[in-house]
Amino acid sequence: MTAKHNGMGRQGHRRRRQKEPRSRGVRVPFTEAEYAAVCAAAERQQMAVAAYAGQVLVAVAEGADPPQWTPLRELMGQVIRAAEQVRRIGNNLNQAVAALHALGRPTGALEGYARVASAAVENLDELAEEIRRRLP
């Protein structure tokens, strides 16, 4: 299995969302076509395959309709990507400031990183406004 289709989807981005940890698992065999359909559905919801399958299975077992994910999920993905971008920009800015202190003058990189940081802040502001508009 590849990292994309091993049930974890986005490697390294696992967060526990349940109050009670899940201690039981089920192995469900699929044909290649079925597995591809499940993977595609999970991808559309920006979820790990196992998380998606688990939520759908529990909903059906409880006699409920499968979860309806909100349009805010797409925005959440954008916020997560923006946060990662800000972390990288912060690292670059720290290196440029360290060079400023070492050399006693700014390097050309400092101005560029500052522009990128400013654009990232604008992007986050736009995302926050979009989320505010969509909230009830």
Image: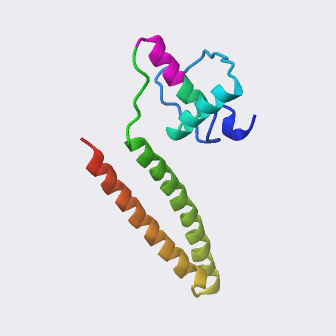
For the point 54% across and 60% down, which residue is it? 85
For the point 46% across and 52% down, which residue is it? 78
Overall secondary structure of the magenta section: helix
Extreme-left residue of the structure: 136
Q: Examine the rendered structure and indicate whether residue 55 appears above or below residue 124.
A: above
Extreme-right residue of the structure: 1
* Residue 123 in view in this figure: yes
Whole-percent x, y for residue 81 in the image: 52, 53
For the point 48% across and 11% down, which residue is it? 61
Question: Can you say which quadrant of the picture contains the N terminus?
Answer: top right
Whole-percent x, y for residue 60 in the image: 46, 15
Whole-percent x, y for residue 26 in the image: 64, 15
Q: Nearer the viewer, residue 17 or 130?
A: 130
Q: Nearer the viewer, residue 64 or 84?
A: 64
Q: Examine the rendered structure and indicate whether residue 41 appears above or below residue 134.
A: above
Q: Is residue 78 left or right of residue 3?
A: left
The span shown in magenta is 54-63
Q: Nearer the viewer, residue 32 or 119?
A: 32
Magenta-span inclusion, residue 62: yes
Residue 98: image quadrant is bottom right
